[in-house]
């Protein structure tokens, strides 16, 4: 018996791919992209193309496990298999005891991007923790600064659909690693370039996208807000702005104009490292080539001033009136267009039935280390992790590990693999992959909704997040009806928000049509949709170039350049002169896939520090040398890959230079697979962004020195 099941990739990726899984006799035998999907068009990224190796990996967690050895240890004999009944009994007993002794806020859920589909991303789990009264998690580790910033200008996270990039004549990839992180946009860009479009990449790192672009601008990290204001300085000075569009659809232009004299190109050049002539040229080309589109991604908002940076970039297509044009505008996240009924998924009102009688306190996930080691009244006594691998992805890893190691912390980790975080778990629970459960899958890089069907039975004794928290709720004795909701009725509820863009989009229809475009153009599907041609999603209908609400947050209500505390423009840069880009790997997804041999082969540069020859030579560092990378938070040992700071497209030894002088690069992986058992997040800080309480992974200063070939790694 052979059948083909339609599924949709739930990983934290803008592309939201349509997937076809071939199932023979209950076993998945093939995965491919669905050629019918208008955006993802039949191909998958290298990571998910090899998904059978993940689903059927011999390393999957298949049964509940209890720890026998000290926390931090892993390997043979560390865990003992237990039954689900035993696991539930222990978890329920511990949660009840902790809640009674310390109050329910002593329990902290921790989840993020492992699964971003509607049900398994956040539904039954949220209900469970609201009802329990657990501390609420501010899920800010990825995109909060950027999300809050785009909303502060446009009112909603919407933007140019990928289909329209083919009509653009000027494409600006700004802090956007398209080849690595958003590959399904690339064919549309290629189409535009065949029609004469120019691709410009603004990125301190020479990504593959930058290497094949028409122009790569290697900006100093954390200075984008200055560049965007500098571009607007030139545009307004030259009168290239669109007075008519601005007067109709924007407010605060006078305040913006008043800011611009502070950002003349010669001054912006000093901050950004982009030559004055290049700033003038970029402003001219962007403002006068029509249509021009910006693919802004989340790279620039991982800096301390990231909220201001995203705000300033979002103003560009407003002042040029680019939103009027097919193939114009900007894309950051499009998720705001879906407007699924998230409230019906999460049922926050359950919080009023918890022992506190109110919604619990909020803990910022970026500061997990602090929460586990410093938080009081009450301290965190139980941690429940799912959809996340904080021991690898959280900043200030030493502090995170110190917290996770606490013997008096009860931690439960629901996982597919034995990750860095399961190394600290008291109980590990087996989680399904998307092959093994059903879900509703939106996207943040296109406007199509999909139902992802279950293709195979759960492996071993794996449970989905939905089933886990449903059963846990019942075992806790929560009698609320909502804990009985089956997946299908939750999908129905999510779709029933009543907004026009979901009208007529039901589960039945999604089960029949594998993908459905939101009703965005008021007419037939497929017509180009111009979200902000006639105004914005703010209460006034106007873009906020000046946003009053930011004053209360201590921010400039327009935007101004304040260099990150960890940047070359601050005193800390004297002690730690190198700006570290603690990057994602192109062939992993944050810390997902890192442990799989097939994926490791695609990512041969793990364990490397990319450093320019200008920075390497004075330190006596040669290609291949072992180096110590350190700051006040910690140190790691990597292998130097010495780069020539070339901005031309010429490759050296078949490779392109990746970093400029003053900048070093390294990639995220699993700590336990790295030398010394630690990864780059030992070096990153838990300092928050100017807006949204986001993470500042890309505002990290370090020093680098040559290390003896044999001196040991360090374990904290
Ligand atoms: N292959 C792969 N795909 C992924 C992921 C992955 O790990 N691997 N992760 C997924 C997730 S969770 C997310 S959030 C998205 C993220 O996708 P992106 O938003 O593209 O995120 P990043 O790769 O963090 O940053 C993009 C680029 O910004 C650059 N950058 C860093 N600092 C600055 C700066 O100060 N200014 C400018 N102009 N650029 C800067 C980086 O060098 C990087 O090349 O990708 C998703 N897709
Ligand atoms: N230095 C540095 N650190 C970073 C970043 C960076 O660029 N540099 N990027 C940051 C960003 S943008 C993000 S989004 C975060 C991501 O951090 P996380 O949200 O922790 O994402 P992943 O590292 O992909 O780990 C997700 C885990 O969830 C598990 N999982 C997958 N599906 C399911 C499921 O259905 N149920 C359960 N229970 N588990 C599941 C996977 O096996 C995986 O181990 O990392 C951040 N950390
Ligand atoms: S990770 Fe992204 S590109 Fe890869 S299959 Fe999933 S949605 Fe598509
Ligand atoms: Mo992310």
Image (spheres, grey):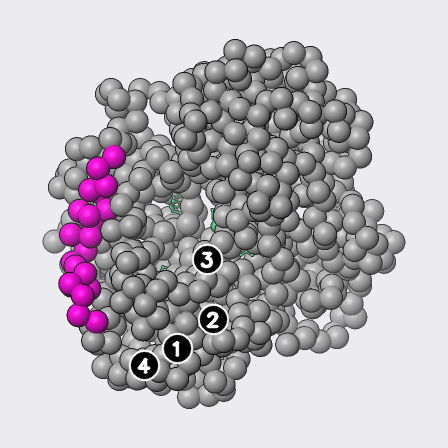
Tell me whether circle 1 and circle 2 mark residues in contact (CB < 8 Å).
no
Image mark for residue 138? 3
- The local crowd at label 2, few if under 14, some if 14 to 19, many if 20 or more residues have their Cα within 10 Å, is many
**Distance between the alpha carbons at the discs numbered 1 and 2:** 25 Å
Q: Where is residue 204 drawn, in percent x and y?
A: 67, 41
Q: Where is residue 361 drawn, in percent x and y?
A: 44, 65
Residue 485 included in the magenta stretch of the image: yes
Q: Is residue 486 left or right of residue 433?
A: left
Secondary structure category for the residue under label 2:
loop
**Distance between the alpha carbons at the discs numbered 4 and 3:** 24 Å
**Distance between the alpha carbons at the discs numbered 4 and 1:** 9 Å
Q: Where is residue 141 drawn, in percent x and y?
A: 51, 55
Q: Nearer the viewer, residue 691 or 252?
A: 252
Residue that label 1 marks = 103
* Residue at left offset 57%, top offset 20%: 319
Disc nearer the start of the sequence (2/3): 3
Image mark for residue 421? 2
Picture quarter with the C terminus: bottom right
Whether residue 453 is visible to the viewer of this picture, yes or no, is no
**Distance between the alpha carbons at the discs numbered 2 and 4:** 23 Å
- The local crowd at label 3, few if under 14, some if 14 to 19, many if 20 or more residues have their Cα within 10 Å, is some
Q: Which residues are magenta?
A: 478-499
Secondary structure category for the residue under label 1:
loop
Q: Where is residue 429 drawn, in percent x and y?
A: 33, 73
Disc nearer the start of the sequence (3/1): 1
Residue that label 4 marks = 96
Mark 2 lies within 8 Å of ligand 2 (Cβ measured):
yes
């Amino acid at each position: 018996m052979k059948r083909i099941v339609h599924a949709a990739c739930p990983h934290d990726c803008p592309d939201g791919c349509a997937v076809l899984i071939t199932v023979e006799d209950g076993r998945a035998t093939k995965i491919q992209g669905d050629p019918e999907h208008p955006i993802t068009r039949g191909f998958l990224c290298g990571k998910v193309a090899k998904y059978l190796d993940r689903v059927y990996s011999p390393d999957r967690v298949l049964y509940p496990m209890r720890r026998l050895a000290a926390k931090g240890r892993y390997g043979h004999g560390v865990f003992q298999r237990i039954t689900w009944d035993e696991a539930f009994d222990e978890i329920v007993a511990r949660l009840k005891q902790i809640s009674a002794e310390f109050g329910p806020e002593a329990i902290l859920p921790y989840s993020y991007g492992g699964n971003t589909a509607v049900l398994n991303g956040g539904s039954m789990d949220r209900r469970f923790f609201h009802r329990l009264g657990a501390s609420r998690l501010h899920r800010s580790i990825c995109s909060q600064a950027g999300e809050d910033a785009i909303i502060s200008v446009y009112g909603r996270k919407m933007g140019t659909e990928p289909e329209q990039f083919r009509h653009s004549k000027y494409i600006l990839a700004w802090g956007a690693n398209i080849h690595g992180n958003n590959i399904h946009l690339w064919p549309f860009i290629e189409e535009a370039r065949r029609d004469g479009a120019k691709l410009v990449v603004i990125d301190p790192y020479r990504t593959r996208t930058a290497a094949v672009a028409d122009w790569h601008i290697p900006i100093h990290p954390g200075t984008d807000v200055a560049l965007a204001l500098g571009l607007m300085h030139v545009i307004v000075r030259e009168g290239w702005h669109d007075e008519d569009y601005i007067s109709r659809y924007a407010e605060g232009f006078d305040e913006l104009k008043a800011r611009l004299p502070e950002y003349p190109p010669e001054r912006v050049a000093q901050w950004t490292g982009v030559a004055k002539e290049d700033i003038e040229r970029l402003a001219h080309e962007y403002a006068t080539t029509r249509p021009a589109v910006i693919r802004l991604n989340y790279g620039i908002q991982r800096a301390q001033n990231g909220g201001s940076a995203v705000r300033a970039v979002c103003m560009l297509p407003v002042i040029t009136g680019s939103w009027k044009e097919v193939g114009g505008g900007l894309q950051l996240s499009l998720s705001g267009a879906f407007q699924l009924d998230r409230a019906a998924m999460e049922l926050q009102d359950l919080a009023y039935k918890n022992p506190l009688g109110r919604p619990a306190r909020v803990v910022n996930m970026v500061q997990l280390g602090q929460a586990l080691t410093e938080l009081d009244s009450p301290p965190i006594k139980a941690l429940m992790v799912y959809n996340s691998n904080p021991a690898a992805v959280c900043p200030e890893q030493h502090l995170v590990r110190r917290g996770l190691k606490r013997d008096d912390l009860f931690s439960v980790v629901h996982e597919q693999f034995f990750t860095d975080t399961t190394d600290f778990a008291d109980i590990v629970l087996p989680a399904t992959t998307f092959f093994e459960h059903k879900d509703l899958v939106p996207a943040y890089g296109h406007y199509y909704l999909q139902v992802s069907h279950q293709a195979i039975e759960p492996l071993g004794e794996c449970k989905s997040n939905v089933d886990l928290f449903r059963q846990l709720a019942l075992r806790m004795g929560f009698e609320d009806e909502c804990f009985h909701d089956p997946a299908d009725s939750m999908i129905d509820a999510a779709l029933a928000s009543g907004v026009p863009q979901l009208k007529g989009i039901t589960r039945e229809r999604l089960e029949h049509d594998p993908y459905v475009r939101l009703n965005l153009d008021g007419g037939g599907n497929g017509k180009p949709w111009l979200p902000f041609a006639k105004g914005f999603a703010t209460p006034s209908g106007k873009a906020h170039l000046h946003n009053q609400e930011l004053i209360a947050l201590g921010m400039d209500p327009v935007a101004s350049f304040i260099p990150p505390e960890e940047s070359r423009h601050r005193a800390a840069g004297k002690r730690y002169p190198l700006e570290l880009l603690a990057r994602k790997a192109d062939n992993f997804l944050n810390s997902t896939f890192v442990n799989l041999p097939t994926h490791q082969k695609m990512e041969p540069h793990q364990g490397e520090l990319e450093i320019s020859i200008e920075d390497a030579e004075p330190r006596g560092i040669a290609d291949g040398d072992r180096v110590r990378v350190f700051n006040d938070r910690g140190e790691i040992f990597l292998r130097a890959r010495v780069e020539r700071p070339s901005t031309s497209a010429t490759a050296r030894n078949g490779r392109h230079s990746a970093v400029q002088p003053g900048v070093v690069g390294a990639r995220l992986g699993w700590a336990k697979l790295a030398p010394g058992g630690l990864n780059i997040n030992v070096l990153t800080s838990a300092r928050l962004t100017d807006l949204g309480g986001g993470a500042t992974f890309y505002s990290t200063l370090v020093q680098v020195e040559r290390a003896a070939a044999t001196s040991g790694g360090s374990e904290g």
